[in-house]
């Protein structure tokens, strides 16, 4: 049997959730689908599906095979479409991950434009400050702020956002305003645990970069939680400027130590390691690169 037929049948069974549904989806008979899967499993020497009277699910080997072959089939389909259509109309599901605050402020507002441009897309936006496993969670692309510690990932840099140290006017009226980074030892610093230098804030002086140890009575793995604490006058926070797009215009928010805060964080689109990246992922990446750049 043709390997492409075997692969097409395999992908159809996974996406349709069963052999009968795959047959209806492809216009083939159920016996033809079963024969193709049997031939594929025999050729590979592994069992791809757990079969029962009620469900068909992937084995561990089947899941790995799907993760590797689905992008390949997508790429073949995209190549066919590019030759038969002057404008590639992308469609299908896109799982996009982004940090919670940055995603809410900068990615979510761009989704309507993306869907308007490509109405065949079905976007799943996952907002979390924790870095997700792109392969395990079947994420097509991630927007990252900061260093990407995944050597096998494909990274496309969009731009950068500067760091900023802020507090509320009410807090500084009560506690005084730090004049140098060393003064932070006497202040309540709110720690964002998702930041690389969470308890050692980065600054730059006449002799170059240096870190200052900070501490306080509140920490969180959520940027939104630290932002709320700063606005409530609890203490001082260190953020990326892009995460404070709304607060920097607030009359009660004051930036401090501006002559010492020189650091920046890259904003990038990240793909999981794949030999073949679908045209859909390429086109959505291009959209975000173009639309995000002016916002940084």
Image (cartoon, helix red, strand yellow):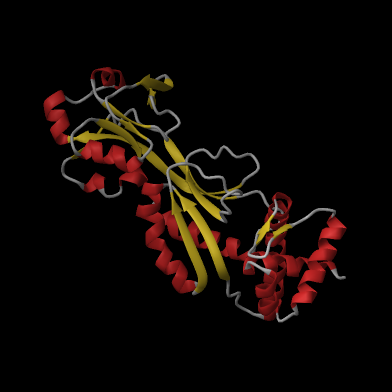
Quarter of the image holding residue 205?
Answer: top left
Question: 295 and 113: which one is in front?
Answer: 113
- Horizontally, residue 39 falls left or right of residue 109, namely right
- Horizontally, residue 77 falls left or right of residue 135, namely right
Quarter of the image holding residue 228?
Answer: top left
Residue at 62% x, 45% y is 153
Number of residue marks: 0
Residue at 23% x, 30% y is 235
Quarter of the image holding residue 11?
Answer: bottom right
Question: 237 and 267: which one is in front?
Answer: 237
Q: Residue furthest front?
A: 53
Does residue 5 appear in this view? no
- Horizontally, residue 208 falls left or right of residue 251, namely right
Residue at 85% x, 65% y is 39
On the image, the x and y values in percent for residue 3 come to 83, 66
On the image, the x and y values in percent for residue 275 come to 71, 53
On the image, the x and y values in percent for residue 278 come to 64, 62
Does residue 292 appear in this view? yes
On the image, the x and y values in percent for residue 81 come to 67, 75
State the quadrant of the N terminus: bottom right
Residue at 46% x, 50% y is 98
Vertical position of residue 25 compared to residue 166: above or below: below
């Amino acid at each position: 049997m043709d390997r492409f037929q075997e692969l097409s049948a395999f992908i159809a069974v996974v996406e349709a959730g069963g052999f009968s549904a795959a047959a209806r989806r492809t216009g083939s008979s159920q016996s033809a689908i079963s024969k193709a899967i049997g031939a594929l499993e025999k050729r590979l020497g592994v069992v791809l599906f757990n079969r029962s009277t009620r469900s068909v699910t992937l084995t561990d080997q089947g899941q790995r095979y799907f993760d590797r072959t689905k992008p390949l089939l997508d790429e073949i389909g995209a190549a066919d479409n590019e030759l038969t259509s002057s404008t590639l109309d992308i469609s299908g599901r896109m799982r996009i991950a982004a940090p919670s605050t940055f995603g809410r402020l900068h990615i979510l507002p761009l989704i309507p434009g993306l869907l308007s441009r490509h109405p065949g897309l079905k976007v799943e936006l996952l907002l979390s400050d924790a870095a997700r496993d792109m392969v395990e969670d079947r994420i097509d692309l991630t927007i990252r702020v900061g260093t990407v510690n995944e050597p096998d990932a494909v990274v496309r840099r969009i731009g950068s956002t500067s760091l900023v140290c802020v507090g509320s006017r009410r807090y500084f009226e009560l506690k005084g305003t730090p004049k140098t980074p060393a003064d932070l030892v006497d202040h309540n610093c709110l720690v964002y645990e998702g930041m690389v230098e969470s308890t050692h804030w980065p600054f730059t002086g006449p002799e170059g970069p240096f870190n200052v140890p900070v501490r306080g009575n509140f920490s969180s793995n959520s940027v939104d939680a630290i932002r709320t604490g700063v606005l409530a006058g609890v203490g001082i926070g260190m953020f990326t400027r892009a995460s404070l797009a709304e607060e920097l215009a607030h009359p009660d928010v004051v930036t401090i130590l501006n002559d010492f805060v020189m650091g920046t964080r890259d904003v990038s689109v990240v793909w999981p390691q794949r030999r073949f990246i679908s045209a859909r992922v390429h086109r959505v990446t291009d959209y975000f690169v173009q639309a995000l750049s002016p916002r940084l």
